[in-house]
């Protein structure tokens, strides 16, 4: 059973370009979470999605950032017009179901975004 | 809002010795979960141990155990018989009503041979 997969593992973009980060949850998992880790910091929650629904996007910047989890295919975190401050590691996690913290989140290996 | 505080930016321990990493949190919820995650240089997040707030018994996983003090909102991690492979960043984390996880800023653990 493959774990959470993220690609690309490393992404380099110039200021003003778009970044697309992909996350394939574990088989049987329908809940996806995106976190951002800035250098020397812990992970910060960005957005929580179920299939075709955004449940909580309270941690996601209002501008330039968007996320989706379509019925088919991976979850996508999209950053438009990237700036140097977007450079970070972006982690995706998935769980089978939500409702309580008893359902463990499994983390992917992360995508390290570097904005030049 | 829930917060998680780790007041030790770095810790070191001699191989085979025991080390305790501290964590405090703040919440108004009565039902929640607490976690310790390990992040080695590969940056993969690995769940080390989990504690349900409604359980009084402290969780243990082999060489890893916690001291959960609910009234004091304290959740420390004890690593016994430390090994070189334990060297990593350790993050304390909290999850409440649904699974949004709040992380502390981490403690860097160095294991000295």
Image (cartoon, coloured by chain):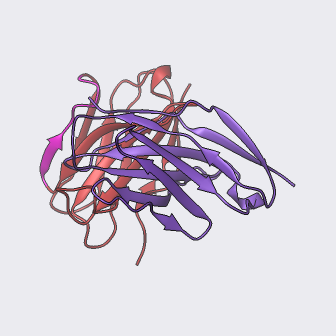
Chain colours: A red, B purple
The x and y percentages for residue A87 are 50, 29
Q: Quadrant of residue A47?
A: top left
The x and y percentages for residue A4 are 40, 63
The x and y percentages for residue A103 are 28, 63
Question: Eyeballing the image, is A83 above or below A77?
Answer: above
Q: Nearest the camera: B22 or A16? A: B22
Of all residues shown, which one is farthest toward the right?
A: B113
* A75 within the magenta span: no
Q: Which quadrant: the N terminus of chain B?
A: top left
Question: Eyeballing the image, is B66 above or below A17?
Answer: below
Q: Residue at x 50, y 26 (%)?
A: A14
The x and y percentages for residue B46 are 51, 58
Left or right of residue A63: residue B89: right
Left or right of residue A42: residue A47: left
Q: Which quadrant: the C terminus of chain B?
A: bottom right
Of all residues shown, which one is farthest toward the bottom?
A: A1
Left or right of residue B10: residue B69: left
Q: Residue at x 51, y 55 (%)?
A: B66
Of all residues shown, which one is farthest toward the left?
A: A53
Q: Nearest the camera: A94 or B112? A: B112
Q: Main secondary structure of the magenta part?
A: loop
Report the magenta residues as a range: A52-62
């Amino acid at each position: 059973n493959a774990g959470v997969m993220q690609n690309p593992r490393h992404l380099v973009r110039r200021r003003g370009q778009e970044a697309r980060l992909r996350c394939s949850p574990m088989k049987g998992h329908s809940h996806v979470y995106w976190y951002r880790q800035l250098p020397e910091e812990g992970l910060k929650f960005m957005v929580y999605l179920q299939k075709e629904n955004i449940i909580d996007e309270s941690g996601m910047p209002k501008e330039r950032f968007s996320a989706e989890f379509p019925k088919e295919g991976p979850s996508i975190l999209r950053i438009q017009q990237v700036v140097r401050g977007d450079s970070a590691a972006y982690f995706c996690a998935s769980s089978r179901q939500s409702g309580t913290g008893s359902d463990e989140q499994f983390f992917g290996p992360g995508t390290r975004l570097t904005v030049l | 809002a829930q917060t998680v505080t780790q007041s030790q930016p770095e810790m070191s321990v001699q191989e085979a010795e025991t080390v305790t990493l501290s964590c405090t949190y703040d919440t108004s919820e009565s039902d929640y979960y607490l976690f310790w995650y390990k992040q080695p240089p590969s940056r993969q997040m690995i769940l080390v141990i989990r504690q349900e707030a409604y359980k009084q018994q402290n969780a243990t996983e082999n060489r890893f155990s916690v001291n959960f003090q609910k009234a004091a909102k304290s959740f420390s991690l004890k690593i016994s018989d430390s090994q070189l492979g334990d060297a990593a960043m350790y993050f304390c984390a909290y999850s409440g009503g649904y699974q949004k996880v709040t992380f502390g800023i981490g403690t860097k653990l160095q294991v000295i041979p």
